């Protein structure tokens, strides 16, 4: 069992801790924490829900306010004569170098546009070309609902039954993770019938980080097109989509990229596909040089940006850009990943010392005592900035009370019914004190539940 202090960085070592000040952290009072002392009400809460909705970068607020000012003072002229030198007609291009760096891509391979599910449908419409022999989609069981719905509707639109055409990989009985060898075995056995392989870079429920490079290699060796949903991976773990030869990927930006609720999405298409006909052309994907001449024939921007359809919201881009600037100034994802591993390791080590923690292999013998186990992989290469805590007794009663008790103490996590609370220590704004508060609060709440013999 690891010593928590082995993970904790000293003030001098923790050079990225200064970026916490770049974010607006809700106070205990604003989060309606009812069990903190009066003198702590105006202090920041301990926010661990950045894997669901990241905190607001102060720069984002500034940039959004500037866009509102530009709209108010320049009106339509802001498209070409912007008072802050961010002409709306090319504003998305400012994000592309930073997004490309975060996903390990060439700038021409990424586009900041639309929303995750719309982009997923767009790319499935582009890449899913089923035949009688090769028509299946390989994915995970209980994928995020947007993905599940997209897979089912796509295969149905081509005349196939989802029950036959969608292969859903599940963990082995009694396990929480989908084993890599099991995915590779399915690809070896059924690859000739699989058209698309699409898994999440990081699984939203367990926090499992899939081996993207190896699965992509196996999928392409079997003749499949391989895409990835990076909603929980971008801004969380290092990615090298170009070098890994990934065909396509989609993501949202409101989780680890902190773009705000319902923020703009993004996509990646490998350079190998450049020049392929665009099946769903839109005005914004037309080359800029003649776009406003409005010619009848579509002439696509080379690469992923040719898939753009409508002009994006300048306000949404500004909200994203403020956070992306912080990522850039912090040196990108690699140094942040190092801090993330320390923070998450510290949290895990403290949780392992709790009297209420039960190793996963011992859960079956827990005799319905109040407690929790961690269902996120212990292998740091197989997880991102998230630990998923499974509470028991597993009857749906304990977890809501724990979540409520933590919130009352100013510790904000994210739940998945019936029994899981996800805690995400985000490298840009969480610190060691946040983690101490989370573990102390958890101990207090579970102690109260144990005393009440829930």
Image: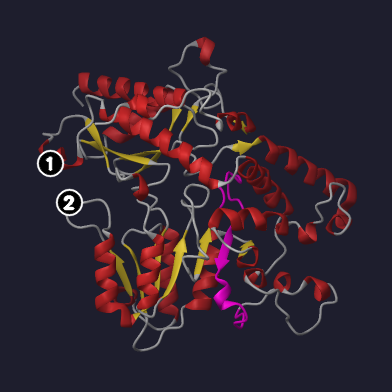
Q: Is residue 376 magenta?
A: no
Q: Residue furthest bottom?
A: 132
Q: Which mark is residue 364?
A: 1
Q: Position of residue 153 (x, y in %)?
A: 43, 72
Drawn side of residue 115 relative to residue 96, left or right: left
- Mark 2: few/some/many CA within 10 Å (<14, 14-19, 20+): few
- Secondary-structure class at tag 2: loop
Q: CA distance from mark 2 to mark 1?
A: 9 Å
The vertical placement of 48 against 105, above or below, is above
Residues in magenta, as a range: 252-279
The vertical placement of 1 against 221, above or below, is above
- Secondary-structure class at tag 1: helix
For marks 2 and 1 on the same chain, the one whose residue lies earlier in the sequence: 2
The residue that appears at 76% across and 40% down in the rendered structure is: 65
Q: Quadrant of the N terminus?
A: top left
Marks 1 and 2: in contact by CB < 8 Å? Answer: yes
Q: Is residue 263 magenta?
A: yes
Q: Position of residue 93 (x, y in %)?
A: 72, 59
Drawn side of residue 198 relative to residue 354, left or right: right
């Amino acid at each position: 069992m690891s010593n928590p202090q082995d993970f904790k960085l000293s003030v001098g070592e923790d050079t990225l801790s200064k970026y916490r000040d770049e974010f607006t952290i809700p106070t205990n009072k604003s989060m309606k924490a009812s069990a903190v002392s009066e003198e702590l009400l105006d202090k920041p809460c301990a926010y661990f829900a950045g894997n669901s909705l990241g905190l607001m970068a102060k720069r984002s607020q500034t940039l959004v306010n500037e866009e509102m000012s530009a709209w108010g003072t320049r009106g339509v002229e802001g498209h070409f004569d912007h008072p802050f030198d961010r002409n709306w007609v090319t504003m998305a291009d400012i994000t592309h170098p930073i997004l490309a760096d975060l996903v390990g891509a060439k700038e021409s391979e990424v586009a900041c546009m639309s929303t995750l599910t719309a982009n997923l449908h767009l790319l499935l419409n582009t890449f899913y070309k089923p035949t009688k022999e090769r028509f299946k989609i390989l994915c995970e069981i209980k994928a995020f609902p947007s993905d599940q719905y997209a897979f089912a509707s796509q295969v149905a639109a081509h005349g196939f039954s989802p029950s036959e055409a969608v292969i859903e990989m599940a963990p082995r009985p009694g396990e929480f993770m989908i084993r890599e060898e099991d995915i590779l075995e399915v690809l070896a056995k059924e690859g000739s019938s699989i058209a698309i392989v699409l898994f999440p870079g990081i699984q939203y429920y367990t926090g499992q980080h899939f081996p993207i490079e190896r699965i992509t290699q196996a999928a392409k060796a079997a003749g499949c097109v391989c895409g990835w949903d990076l909603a929980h991976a971008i801004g969380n773990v290092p990615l090298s989509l170009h070098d890994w030869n990934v065909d396509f990927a989609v993501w949202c930006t409101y989780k680890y990229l902190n773009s705000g609720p319902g923020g703009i999405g993004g996509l990646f298409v490998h350079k190998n596909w450049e020049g392929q006909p665009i099946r769903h052309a839109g005005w914004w994907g037309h080359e800029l040089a003649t776009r406003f001449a409005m010619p009848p024939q579509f002439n696509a921007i080379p690469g992923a940006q040719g898939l753009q359809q409508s002009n994006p919201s300048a306000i949404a881009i500004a909200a994203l850009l403020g956070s992306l600037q912080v990522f850039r100034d912090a040196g990108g994802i690699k140094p942040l990943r190092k801090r993330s591993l320390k923070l998450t390791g510290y949290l895990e080590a403290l949780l392992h010392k709790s009297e209420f923690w039960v190793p996963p292999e011992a859960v079956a013998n827990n005799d319905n005592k109040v407690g929790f186990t961690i269902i996120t992989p212990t292998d740091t290469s197989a997880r991102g900035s998230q630990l998923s805590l499974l509470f028991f007794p597993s009857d749906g009663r304990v977890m809501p009370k724990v979540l409520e008790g933590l919130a009352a103490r100013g510790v904000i996590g994210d739940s998945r019914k019936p029994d899981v609370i996800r805690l995400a220590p985000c490298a840009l704004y969480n610190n060691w004190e946040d983690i101490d508060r989370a573990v102390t609060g958890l101990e207090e709440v579970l102690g109260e539940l144990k005393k009440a013999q829930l």
